[in-house]
Amino acid sequence: MPDRRLPLARAREAGLLPDLPAIRNDIMGAAANLYEELIFRNPRIPTAENFPNWPTCPLSELNEAQRAVYAFYEIVDSVPPFEWLSLLLDGRGNLPLIVWAGRFADIGKTGEYIEHLICMSGGDPDVLAAAFAASPDTAHATTKWKQRRLGRDPIRSASMDWWYSDGPGHADFNQRVFDFALRRLPDLIALDEK
């Protein structure tokens, strides 16, 4: 597998060392800013030239920490602060990655709410996470969905308040993403380069 970590010189140039101070300065945008610096601006990761500028290499060529950073950006890109987390269900192909990353990095209540919404829509988060862990590049095509559960649900309502209109979920999510990146810095930046 190629080493697709951000080159050390580029990390220094972007002010990411020693402990991601450039990201900490805008903690509410941590997920988006980490993606931009560690994936989109990373010369070792080819990305599409046109929006949405996703990586064009297979996910299996990214290490686990990079896959997680990509998944977190998928969440904030798909669900802006003025929308509901249930918008993620429109992109079912991304859900195996998102569920796996949420568990891998422990995104807390945000991950719990996402998984509950998946269950309400007939999906099985355990199956999605296992499918991604087994085959990152094909998990999106191998998952099955059951019939959707209808009706009012107090957890779904709580998830709306959690995320909607810059609720407490945004701060919690971005802080957890930042803490994860800080713990996994050697997997995201080639600190061992001379």
Image: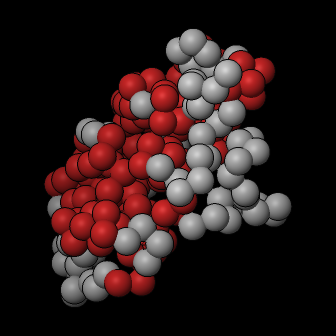
Q: Quadrant of the C terminus?
A: top right
Query: What residue sits 36% from the left and 51% below the top?
Result: 101
Q: Is residue 71 above or below residue 184?
A: below
Query: What residue sits 71% from the left and 19% below the top?
Result: 12
| Most foreground residue, 148 or 179 | 179
**Residue 178's x, y, as percent?**
46, 28
Left or right: 22 in relation to 13: left
| Residue furthest out toward the front | 194
Left or right: 185 in relation to 169: right
**Residue 39's x, y, as percent?**
64, 45
Query: What residue sits 22% from the left and 72% below the top?
Result: 127
Residue 167 seen from this side? no
Query: What residue sits 57% from the left and 67% below the top?
Result: 58
Residue 3 seen from this side? yes
Left or right: 26 in relation to 154: right
| Most foreground residue, 64 or 152 | 64
Q: Is residue 88 above or below residue 77?
A: below
The quarter of the displayed image where residue 57 is located: bottom right
| Most foreground residue, 59 or 76 | 59
**Residue 9's x, y, as percent?**
74, 24
